[in-house]
Image (cartoon, rainbow, N blue to C red):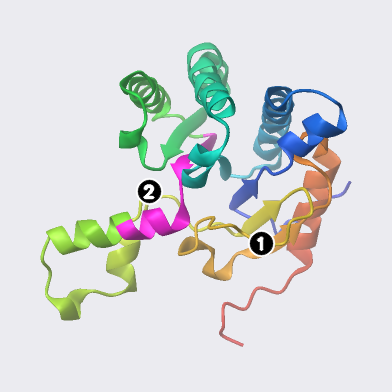
């Protein structure tokens, strides 16, 4: 596929459909999550090749704690495995790994692995992989407001810029493009503050079936859109 020059700087993906993929293939849910991770690695490589600077993926939401205990434990253990066994590969590729969410609610072991991974890769400049873990959009805004209230500012000084500066990682630019797989037509709380002017693309395919060609098609669709940001 011939790609346009008008590429997004930041792409966020809601990787939806792992469990449905597993059911479709008559496999347990955790096999769907494993397949989803393989897809993430492939698409991550494509994003780097295309020159996408920031890639955000939603790995575990604040609502996911309500899933079956066995599945939740698998997901968290799988994140630990990735941080232990796959980190060297991310580092070798020049990827700066960022993990975003209510990390203080995770186990001490997982917090340590996250901290070590972010520190190891912090000087990498080829691309940023922002993994949303124990993340919820409302939770992020609530935490930002709490931080502002603790500082006891003059009420008249509270504006959009101040709130944005207290989000989890304000140094990461807002997503230009948000992709959701599996045919669901909603954002489910993905970065509600930052997504104000994001272009949205919804794909029917389940996440494990999402391909480089599908990703390129999303980039091409983004390039065709006229982004006016409310100015025209």
Which element carries disc 2, helix, strand or loop? loop
Label 1 crowd (10 A; few <14 / some 14-19 / many >=20) = few
Q: Is residue 131 visible?
A: no
**On the rendered structure, is 222 left or right of 171?**
right
Please tell me the numbered disc located at residue 169.
Answer: 2
Q: Nearer the viewer, mark 2 or mark 1?
A: 1
Which residue corresponds to mark 1?
A: 186
Instruction: Using the image as rendered, state which of residue 26 and residue 163 is in the foreground.
Output: 26
- Write the start and end of the magenta stretch as one range: 126-142
**On the rendered structure, is 151 left or right of 131?**
left
Residue farthest toward the bottom in the current orientation of the protein: 232
What residue is drawn where x is 66% and y is 61%?
A: 186
The x and y percentages for residue 168 are 36, 49
What residue is drawn where x is 57% and y is 77%?
A: 229
> Is residue 138 inside the magenta stretch?
yes
Which of the two discs, 2 and 1, labels the residue nearer the N terminus? 2
**On the rendered structure, is 115 left or right of 213?**
left
What residue is drawn where x is 53% and y is 69%?
A: 196
What residue is drawn where x is 35% and y is 24%?
A: 107
The mark tally for this picture is: 2
Instruction: Using the image as rendered, state which of residue 99 and residue 24 is in the foreground.
Output: 24
> Is residue 187 inside the magenta stretch?
no
Instruction: Using the image as rendered, state which of residue 102 and residue 221 is in the foreground.
Output: 102
The x and y percentages for residue 29 are 71, 27
Q: Are marks 2 and 1 in contact (CB under 8 Å)?
A: no
Instruction: Using the image as rendered, state which of residue 78 and residue 30 is in the foreground.
Output: 30
The x and y percentages for residue 14 are 64, 47
């Amino acid at each position: 596929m011939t790609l346009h020059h008008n590429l997004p700087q930041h792409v966020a993906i809601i990787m939806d459909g792992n469990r449905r993929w597993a059911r479709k293939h008559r496999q347990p849910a955790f096999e769907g999550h494993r397949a989803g991770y393989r897809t993430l690695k492939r698409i991550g490589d494509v994003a780097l090749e295309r020159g996408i600077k920031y890639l955000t993926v939603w790995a575990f939401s604040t609502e996911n704690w309500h899933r079956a205990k066995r599945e939740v434990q698998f997901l968290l253990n799988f994140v630990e495995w990735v941080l232990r066994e796959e980190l060297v590969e991310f580092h070798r590729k020049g990827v700066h790994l960022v993990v975003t969410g209510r990390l203080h609610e995770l186990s001490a072991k997982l917090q340590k692995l996250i901290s070590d991974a972010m520190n190891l890769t912090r000087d990498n400049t080829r691309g940023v992989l922002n993994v949303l873990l124990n993340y919820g959009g409302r939770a992020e805004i609530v935490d930002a407001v709490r931080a502002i209230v603790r500082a006891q500012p003059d009420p008249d000084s509270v504006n959009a810029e101040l709130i944005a500066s207290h989000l989890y990682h304000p140094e990461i630019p807002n997503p230009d493009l948000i992709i959701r797989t599996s045919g669901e037509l909603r954002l489910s709380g993905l970065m509600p503050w930052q997504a104000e002017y994001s272009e949205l693309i919804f794909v029917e395919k389940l996440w494990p079936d999402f391909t480089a060609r599908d990703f390129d098609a999303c980039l091409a669709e983004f390039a065709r859109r006229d982004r006016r940001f409310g100015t025209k």
